[in-house]
Amino acid sequence: MRGFFKKLRNGLQKTREQLVGQISEVVTGTPQFDDELFEEIEEVLIASDCGLETAAHLTGRLREVCEERKTMKATEVVEIIKEQMIVMLNGGSAPVDAVIDVTPKVYLFVGVNGTGKTTSIGKIGEHFRSAGKSVLFAACDTFRAAAREQLQIWADRSGADLVSGDDGSDPAAVAFDAVNAAKARGRDVVLIDTAGRLHTKHNLMEELKKISRAVDKALPGAPHETLLVLDATTGQNGVSQAESFGDAVGLTGLILTKLDGTAKGGIILGIRQRFGVPVSWIGVGEKIDDLETFDSREFIEALFA
């Protein structure tokens, strides 16, 4: 995990410069705790895509502590913000391998095109395989041949099964067949890829609802996890995506990708604060080990390191 911490620290460089660096500048020396200071800190948080609610929450808590202590050094101010961020993100996720409490356990992945959804599914499948779990991929994006081809590559690499359909076939039918195949073959995990056209399109959301119903019909209670894959570089647009997909199918977790390419990593705080949905995985690169289960303290420690 320490190797990933180094990657995470390096990947968060842009966010660190935008967020931590500017907060440190604002509170340099022994700051004067007045409205102007708190407003400047709030502006920095908003600029890092933490969101208005999160920025107000963090500065409000900071104001309370400052009123209690009266005087503080700049380093103490930064430490308070850091600890409050950890508290806000806590409950990120249980270790994935420890929660295979039903067989097969079905994971439904949703998200717009370009977020790295199919690649993330492949990496998570490899993670399960390395932990000794048997995996079945369901290629339910029947509108994009490249998605099926990508999953086939990951299946071949990890020795996983793949269930897919013809071009333009019913995605819900593929999902139904995939879960039944996993049951018949005794597989531990089913990872379902889905289409990701624009999240504002009504048809996509209705299609996802249909897939979810089909999976529940094949295995009552499934899907057991519904994970939204978000591209961190989209910033506040990620909030609207979380709202749209959450309203359609309900979300149990988030996968945040491409953190290494953005100064908007604060979005992770904004979504957690607004929707209460935990972050399950984070990605900081293209390699297979650049996607890892989320640990809130490790994330914030890497951000402030």
Image (cartoon, rainbow, N blue to C red):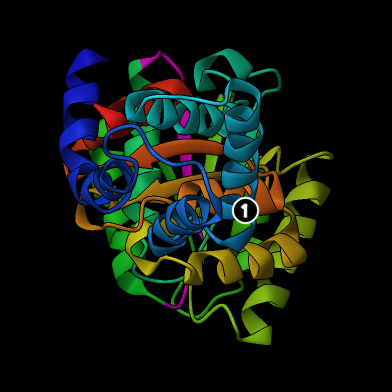
Q: Which residue is mark 1?
A: 56
Looking at this view, is 112 or 269 the one in front?
A: 269
- Magenta stretch encompasses residue 39: no
Q: Against 155, is 144 above or below?
A: below
Tell whether 293 sits left or right of 175: left
Q: Which residue: 24% across, 33% down?
A: 8
| Extent of the magenta region | 131-143
x, y percentage for residue 19? 32, 49
Q: Report helix, strand or loop for mark 1.
A: helix
Image label count: 1
Looking at this view, is 55 or 258 the one in front?
A: 55
Q: What is the three-letter code of the residue carrying label 1?
A: Ala
Q: Quadrant of the N terminus?
A: top left
Q: Which residue: 22% across, 14% down?
A: 2
Asked if residue 178 shows in the view, the reply is: no
Looking at this view, is 211 or 258 the one in front?
A: 258
